[in-house]
Image (cartoon, coloured by chain):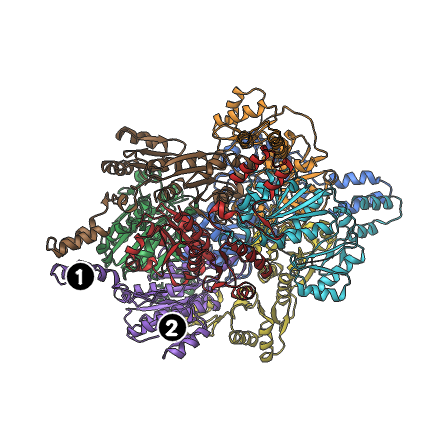
Chain colours: A cyan, B brown, C red, D green, E purple, F yellow, G blue, H orange
Amino acid sequence: MKSKLEDTLEKVYKGKLKPSEALKVLKDYPYQDLSFAKIDHHREIRRGFPEIVYGLGKTEEQLFKIASEILKKGHNLLITKIEESVFKHLKKRISGLSYNATAKVVFKKQKKAIEGKGTIIIMTAGTTDIPVAEEAFVTCDVLGNRVKKIYDVGVAGIHRLFGEYEKIREARVIITVAGMEGALPSVVAGLVKAPVIAVPTSVGYGASFQGLAALLAMLNSCRGGVGVVNIDNGFGAAYLASLINHL
Amino acid sequence: MKSKLEDTLEKVYKGKLKPSEALKVLKDYPYQDLSFAKIDHHREIRRGFPEIVYGLGKTEEQLFKIASEILKKGHNLLITKIEESVFKHLKKRISGLSYNATAKVVFKKQKKAIEGKGTIIIMTAGTTDIPVAEEAFVTCDVLGNRVKKIYDVGVAGIHRLFGEYEKIREARVIITVAGMEGALPSVVAGLVKAPVIAVPTSVGYGASFQGLAALLAMLNSCRGGVGVVNIDNGFGAAYLASLINHL
Amino acid sequence: MKSKLEDTLEKVYKGKLKPSEALKVLKDYPYQDLSFAKIDHHREIRRGFPEIVYGLGKTEEQLFKIASEILKKGHNLLITKIEESVFKHLKKRISGLSYNATAKVVFKKQKKAIEGKGTIIIMTAGTTDIPVAEEAFVTCDVLGNRVKKIYDVGVAGIHRLFGEYEKIREARVIITVAGMEGALPSVVAGLVKAPVIAVPTSVGYGASFQGLAALLAMLNSCRGGVGVVNIDNGFGAAYLASLINHL
Amino acid sequence: MKSKLEDTLEKVYKGKLKPSEALKVLKDYPYQDLSFAKIDHHREIRRGFPEIVYGLGKTEEQLFKIASEILKKGHNLLITKIEESVFKHLKKRISGLSYNATAKVVFKKQKKAIEGKGTIIIMTAGTTDIPVAEEAFVTCDVLGNRVKKIYDVGVAGIHRLFGEYEKIREARVIITVAGMEGALPSVVAGLVKAPVIAVPTSVGYGASFQGLAALLAMLNSCRGGVGVVNIDNGFGAAYLASLINHL
Amino acid sequence: MKSKLEDTLEKVYKGKLKPSEALKVLKDYPYQDLSFAKIDHHREIRRGFPEIVYGLGKTEEQLFKIASEILKKGHNLLITKIEESVFKHLKKRISGLSYNATAKVVFKKQKKAIEGKGTIIIMTAGTTDIPVAEEAFVTCDVLGNRVKKIYDVGVAGIHRLFGEYEKIREARVIITVAGMEGALPSVVAGLVKAPVIAVPTSVGYGASFQGLAALLAMLNSCRGGVGVVNIDNGFGAAYLASLINHL
Amino acid sequence: MKSKLEDTLEKVYKGKLKPSEALKVLKDYPYQDLSFAKIDHHREIRRGFPEIVYGLGKTEEQLFKIASEILKKGHNLLITKIEESVFKHLKKRISGLSYNATAKVVFKKQKKAIEGKGTIIIMTAGTTDIPVAEEAFVTCDVLGNRVKKIYDVGVAGIHRLFGEYEKIREARVIITVAGMEGALPSVVAGLVKAPVIAVPTSVGYGASFQGLAALLAMLNSCRGGVGVVNIDNGFGAAYLASLINHL
Amino acid sequence: MKSKLEDTLEKVYKGKLKPSEALKVLKDYPYQDLSFAKIDHHREIRRGFPEIVYGLGKTEEQLFKIASEILKKGHNLLITKIEESVFKHLKKRISGLSYNATAKVVFKKQKKAIEGKGTIIIMTAGTTDIPVAEEAFVTCDVLGNRVKKIYDVGVAGIHRLFGEYEKIREARVIITVAGMEGALPSVVAGLVKAPVIAVPTSVGYGASFQGLAALLAMLNSCRGGVGVVNIDNGFGAAYLASLINHL
Amino acid sequence: MKSKLEDTLEKVYKGKLKPSEALKVLKDYPYQDLSFAKIDHHREIRRGFPEIVYGLGKTEEQLFKIASEILKKGHNLLITKIEESVFKHLKKRISGLSYNATAKVVFKKQKKAIEGKGTIIIMTAGTTDIPVAEEAFVTCDVLGNRVKKIYDVGVAGIHRLFGEYEKIREARVIITVAGMEGALPSVVAGLVKAPVIAVPTSVGYGASFQGLAALLAMLNSCRGGVGVVNIDNGFGAAYLASLINHL
């Protein structure tokens, strides 16, 4: 934004732009207004990544328009929390879309370079945590990172975790996905130098209270070096991991 | 209670007791009424242990009277959740009382036989969980069990836990005491055959919500074989452990 | 795990195994990796029971593969929280499967010996608590215990409970299943020497908050000797009861 | 209020009162304005009882003025939730005040007739519930009822409750006061015809969450015929019991 | 129960009954065991009303058997929280059943005498509270009370409430049914001598949290004389009202 | 109401009305009783707006009758939270009804004058907040206000908000609609003189807890000048905004 | 801010300011940096009122410096949530400070003009709500409004409220302050055209949960036209009322 | 740990170590047992940082012993959540200790090299968030990072934040500390490429619920790239930031 502002001020100074015009430029520049949504094309410059689309609650028509505009600019497309039926409709109107049915995400990679510096490892405590982990996996991938998966290594059978010890130590960033008692990030963070991102999941029943138990456990991790994201937010964890991995 | 009932019915049948007298006997027998409290002297027979006194919210005078009556019957005395100042007053009026200041319990062992069959092991995740663990320790001891302590072996430094692996496997019952993310019982229960009793503690701050985080984590333990008691309830865990150890 | 470790160290010492090979052995031994799940075949040795499968959120294909591997080793199979439609599919591919429709569990007993030392009694407060109690019943059975059921003896009609008094006293372990005000375990624990495992259920409406009311009541049981498991967790209660009953 | 309205309308009709005067009368009649409080002297007529003063958060000066005005009208005075130090100050300025230190209530009976038709029985589950029960006791007494107390008969020692069975059945209304798992009203309501009023108390710790556990348990009572009041609200229970007992 | 006990003791005393037989009598008498349910036929004697059946979560077969046994004894039948489809099945097998579709209750009155002494008035704050109010209405009716309804008189249009003032004052007991802010019982209890029973309902959305807002408001009623029941528990309110109305 | 009362008193004074008749008038005047609902036709006089109908939980027949009566008086009609299928049925029986499918409201404007003094601006943080914003939009419109919409200007892309800065400053009242972290009203209220009404929405998942996160954030707005309404309550926000805009 | 931006752009255009200088101006203008706090002197222009200081958690030294700077600019000073001991220290260093001990606010009016157009009425449900109401009162006063108080008119004695009906109808804005069941704003909003601001208070005990009950009740007000602020936030309510009153 | 294991296996292979001795080595190596605490000296190797001591709930004697052992190894010392009085006692026994009274942390830097690669910026929303920010500041410093502070830039005065825009963009990692509505991280994360760590604080009152409001808001941040830690956990945020800054 700075260069834009500086640039505009330069032009005004040199008399190439009137104040009233400058006001317009400064107001309208960085996003595109579709009336129901304002697409932030500038995000790639400011944030290092294109805008990711949160699919839940958007109509098919809205998703189609947003997706089209993003792809037109040459960005990678990623839409999360989206049902297969919606994907099927979009697919008819936009070519080259892929769908990860476990993760419920639609994506299209127009840029394929891997720019993340190390490997992101995604671990789950159980088999039922896999959908959230897959959302993180596709996001990491679309954002240009090397990713490895280690699934079903929860703390109840701690030897399963230790069997993967060598692999875990090689990660530059680790994403741990766990429901129920959510203890996985605490144990993992005690074993490695890598920052650990913790994703509570809503798997479980009764006193898991849709992931609240895991969320609280992770926030209370007795071990420093753990950052927590929202319940079932595989995308958010991946986005943060990718930011770190691109440092 | 059955033998009492049977016995009374027998006497009535044989004409040794009138129905109206029988009614009184059946009504008044098993407890002693102090107006503000009804002491259950029969508990030792029915439950295998004498009545334990919950100290919080009772006046010194009430505690003195209850303690005196229990000791008079030859039972072991145990009063939990009691301040040192109250202990000092009681001590002047009742001889032989001991006080565990960390656990805040008063006790007097009149029966010293160890009847529990194996060893109960009490583990804590951190140093700040020790007061609750000590309440469990004294309770187990007063109820006639062999007890061992393993403190500060939380999951954040999982190798500390594994250093104690041999000891842990020898327990007949295990009590795990943990605050914050409360992951210790899940890990321990995955390693042993012994039943594991989990005590959440209110240590921590913020999103520990006075032990709620640890409580929920323990209830959601992905591993079977874990029974949970109330937050900070070292006594309750010990009582249950002792019942199991006496089987 | 110890004997494995000892054994491996012995072999290394005697030159029968190279350090690099030993590392592999120690890492890979006790579980079988299906990529989406890591089956813990060693659990029977370490824990005394085979691995029980939590069915919720697993695909049919995943369940089929896990079940097949467990049965191949000669273990008893138990899958909890599973819909009848899924069972019907599994049944076509695996012979000898049974389904308890009330409990929603699939099981197959390949080992039928009863090794539990006493009787486990399962009680419910009401008729609507029966599905959870049945999950506990099948689990106890598959894990090799003698089990009896006493249903619909909640505290609102306390005389119904007393009609079963003789039976209750004979139990080695008692599982109490109750929703709503969850008072059954408190009353029962006051009457017996057996450890009492309390299972809150999500029956009820309004301020039962899906079992929270019963859960809190049970955790606050004024009577020692009660261990609580997660809401609707009949399996967990049975697993703990079985561990105790095998002591 | 009706007769007042009717009466005023009559006077207006007969020309004895102008409309503008009638408006004033109708507006100002039934309460006395002390600027910080509006005393409802009419309550005795409308509700059958005088106004009870909630002491918490009122200054000594405010309490003095309110109390003086109530006594001036010849009503009974009852101030709840009030510290002994405040009572001592009030006592110097108003003669004949009594203080129940357990209940923390100040009272003065100017009318002593017992108009309640039957006996109200107040029961507690434990000794620590007594302060709340005493608040109920004094309130019932000041409101003109016969009251009996049965303390420390919680469900953990259910035989203590049955020892009081005869007494309990004689009550016209029963108030049950219980913290922790709050099961007492459920059991009692299953045994009697009298309406049962349940008062949860904040005794306990950990997952009692300051009385929430008992409150939820009571609201979920599986037995009809139970009305619940706020946590620690001995006064409210007594007021309701007295209304019923005066029917 | 007392007379039964006395009577049995008498017989034993007179040698007409052996102790062992007496034990059986005392154990088996007051309920009928259907294995999945224990019907409490004695409740009518002990509590003054027959057993009401809670329909939710019971199978059609279970409901049929329970209903049949209750009707066989000549009691009135009332089953709450039951879908119309279930009613249609029951109707084919049991003659004379009625269904209140708004309240979702099945009933059959075999005894029609009105024994309640006064009138119970049922008020709702809004139109959407009516289903819960109707459950209360049918229950009051089946239990032998005179009942009147005053619907849609919530506090937002307080003049609607005052239009009904005369009627309200004639009630012996008042049931107020309200969701959202749940203020109706507080206002009503300030106007009458009758005890007020408050039923929070789960109508509303957002921060009503399924009736929690109304529940808390009612528990905090600044006015004494209000007893609260569970959210949506029209039956419980009616049962309590009926007990009071029969005093 | 005042003029009614005054007027009635005048008539009584002048002998034109008997007291008993006056009582009736005062009691029955301002609402129309449909037995299941009491329509408040007087609201337009007292409150400045006609009664708005809350559609959720009302039957089609009830809605038809209420709508008919409101339209008969010449008022504008607005029914909120109503499914399209219900609208279709109503449309057949009442002419001129419109339906906003995004907002799920039915309306008919019989009075079209704009009497609000300034412009109400409705902003949303995201695209998924639009349905709630549309409910507010239609309500503002039906209540006679000029309204503008600014959608998808959440704080995550704060420059989008600043692009609308000029527009925002022109509002007389601002309604901000936001889910998730609910930060929009805090930022907006820091920029303008207009009062800001905050509507939390239930969009989001996991730790949004159906809008609780946004609700709490808005209540804690560090900036004065923000009034909060219930989660998803677009209608309530619009009603308040309209009251302010008509001042 | 706009005029600042426009003005700066003008200067740059005319060559009176270099772009690099303009950047500084735009960055540094509207606040004063005290390192621990950034005082927003521009708020008076942007928002219509000076910055109000939230006293809780600030040191005396910090408060002294902030207060000095605000007074130096000629603004009115208002510091909320501040203990009397702190006031006494400030008073020694700053002349002319006043303290409202009930409200716990420090203030100094340097500008005394009343610019609010109508009267703001502040009502409380009870006597214990007065401290919060007084915070609102002082804030309204300092912000230049005419204010009236009507205290202790809660819904339990609804006739007290009606006695004040004439006064209430004259308000341009109404602030209602209530704890416990929080019903006052619902009733008031049904009677007037003025917008109603609702302040829940933390008075009460037990299930008031520190004001949560009142907060939820107010958010669920069945009547439109109510805006809610944080629990005990008298200041926030007054700030919003003042904004509205200055329209 | 791996090299240790490998090394030990090598020695066993070469006959330099017996299996039984190897078992001991593997068990006892990486921590030092003080009975009440097990210090993890190896953490510096495994995790890259020495063990940080959580001061709350530890006795002075325990803290002295732990601190002494850590300093003896040449590590930097950091003790969090510790009162000044405790510091004063420790200071007498250990030379060179410093105390940050705002942050309540004790520290001693024995290693002073800055190894973090970029700058960590710590921002607060308000003045009252500073103590938590200072805990983060000292931790970052002790762990060898360059740190800058930007305090009191909350979203209510968004221009204050923009005045710091240039500085913010230079950070390698950003820690945002905010209570109340907790919106700061959402806004900041929308402006930069750096990963943002969000620390909710318990400042505020009423519906902040001790930081719950800010915590939920941060977890629901509509912007990716935000990792949340426990309420008031400045240390945890700094530890994570430092791990990232050392990558």
Discs 1 and 2 carry the same chain letter: yes
Side of D2 relative to F227 (left or right): left
Q: How many marks?
A: 2
Q: Quadrant of residue E72?
A: bottom left
- Marking on residue A36: none
Q: Quadrant of residue F54?
A: bottom right
Q: What residue is disc 2 on?
A: E64
Is residue F135 or residue B186 the one in the foreground? B186
Q: Position of residue B212 (x, y in %)?
A: 48, 45
Label 1 to label 2: alpha-carbon separation: 34 Å
Mark closest to the chain's N terminus, 1 or 2: 1
Q: Quadrant of the C terminus of chain C?
A: top left
Is residue F29 or residue A204 the one in the foreground? A204
Side of E231 relative to A83 (left or right): left
Residue G105 is at least partly visible in this image: no
- Three-letter amino acid code of the residue under disc 2: Phe
Q: SS class of the residue under badge 2?
A: helix
- Marking on residue E8: 1
Q: Position of residue H186 (x, y in %)?
A: 66, 47
Side of F192 relative to B108 (left or right): right
Q: Quadrant of residue H240?
A: top right
Is residue H115 or residue E182 the one in the foreground? H115
Residue at the image point whose x is 87% and y is 41% from the top: G15
